[in-house]
Image (cartoon, rainbow, N blue to C red):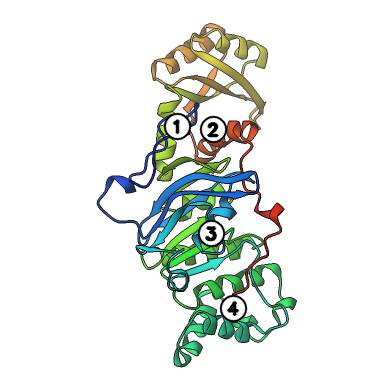
Amino acid sequence: MLRRPGNQSPRVPNLIESPLLQTAVEPLVQVDRVSKRYGRTLAVADLSFGVAKGEVLGFLGPNGAGKTTTMRVITGFMPPSEGRVLVGGLDIAESPLEVRSRIGYLPENPPLYPEMEVTAFLEFAARLRGVPKGGIRPAVERAIERCALGEARERIIGKLSRGYRQRVGLAQALVHEPEVLVLDEPTAGLDPKQIHETRKLIRTLAGERTVVLSTHILPEVTVTCDRVVIIAGGRLRAEDTPENLVARLGAAERGRGTWEIETAAPADAAEAALRAVPGVARVEAGPETAERTLVLQVEAAGDRAIATDLARALLEAGCPLFGLRRGGASLEDVFLALTTEETETNGTGDSSDATGAPEEHP
């Protein structure tokens, strides 16, 4: 077993369960009870999770959660203080060169040489990655095509836009056809069209490559990732599919839910009627719609009976009812529930920026 249940959020219990660990499939990447200290600061604490072959894993956490530190440990950029990382059954501490040859890494700040042309840089990266001499040119051409760099292939990297530099960074991570891709904020600085193209590329790699993807864009996780790991304060908070996490949040909230109600009544009268209903925890009025109706958000018990009580209360108060819809939790709700209290109370987190650790060139 890769990890022990623990450090669970008091607000969202029992989310720290992994369907991957309940199968006989051996994960291609195993992070096994990894901790990382910078002096007295504990950036990552007893962190364990696995990534199956061909899976796209979303790695989430607030700023300072330990995401970048974890990715640097996975890629062999820095050693863990405790624990180990296995890639294809190999311990990265014992077989660093072989493990690194299986990994493509895109840091948040791409490791580029600004004075080089794009093609020359990718050829250089391919040689560093051990691509055979006769295979360098085909490997570079594949990377350029995948990352849509044809128009920039002969340009100087330092003169490229942020979006193009990001794509060059992704190309250098792909050029040696690695089994595992570790991508730290791969869509940072890209325009909407480029973000769409990058998401599409990552999805085409699913099944063919194992991808660990760190991002702050939660809709990107829903669209791109098969499974999610959420950390806060350097500790594992949840691990499951996005759909299961959202479903478990609903169960953990003990049946509470959000109801959206549309009425034409004055706000004061409607709010008073709804607050009087047993089980209602909060009523919040929004602005009037174009049809001069009022939309209210009501936090209340999640069973169907409450809907009848809400409708009856409005009608008895003389408030016309035009709509009553059940709201649902989202991945953003899960993320906030798991990380908000942790970041306010836990002093651990990612201090890698404060260490002055240099960025790695390929």
Query: CA separation, marks 4 and 2?
Result: 40 Å
Q: Which residue is the site of mark 1?
A: 249
**Within 10 angstroms of label 4, few (less than 14), some, or many (20 or more) residues?**
many
Q: Which residue is mark 4?
A: 149
Task: Give SS at disc 4.
Answer: loop
Q: Residue furthest left?
A: 24
- Residue that badge 2 annotates: 337
First reached walking from the N terminus: tag 1 or tag 4 = 4
C-alpha gap between disc 3 and disc 2: 31 Å
Q: Nearer the viewer, mark 4 or mark 2?
A: 2
Mark seen at residue 79: 3
For disc 1, the neighbor class at 10 Å (few under 14, some 14 to 19, many from 20) is: many
How far across and down, in percent of the image, does residue 355 sit?
69, 55
Question: From this viewpoint, which residue is outermost toward the bottom?
Answer: 134
Q: Nearer the viewer, residue 137 or 355?
A: 355
Q: Are marks 2 and 1 in contact (CB under 8 Å)?
A: yes
Relative to 312, does residue 131 appear above or below in the rendering?
below
Residue 4 lies, with reference to residue 228, above or below; the image says above
- Mark 3: give few (<14), some (14-19) or many (20+) Cα within 10 Å: many
Give the quarter of the image for residue 183. bottom right
Mark 4 and mark 2 lie on one chain; the one further toward the N terminus is 4
**Of the image marks 3 and 2, the number of the one nearer the N terminus:** 3
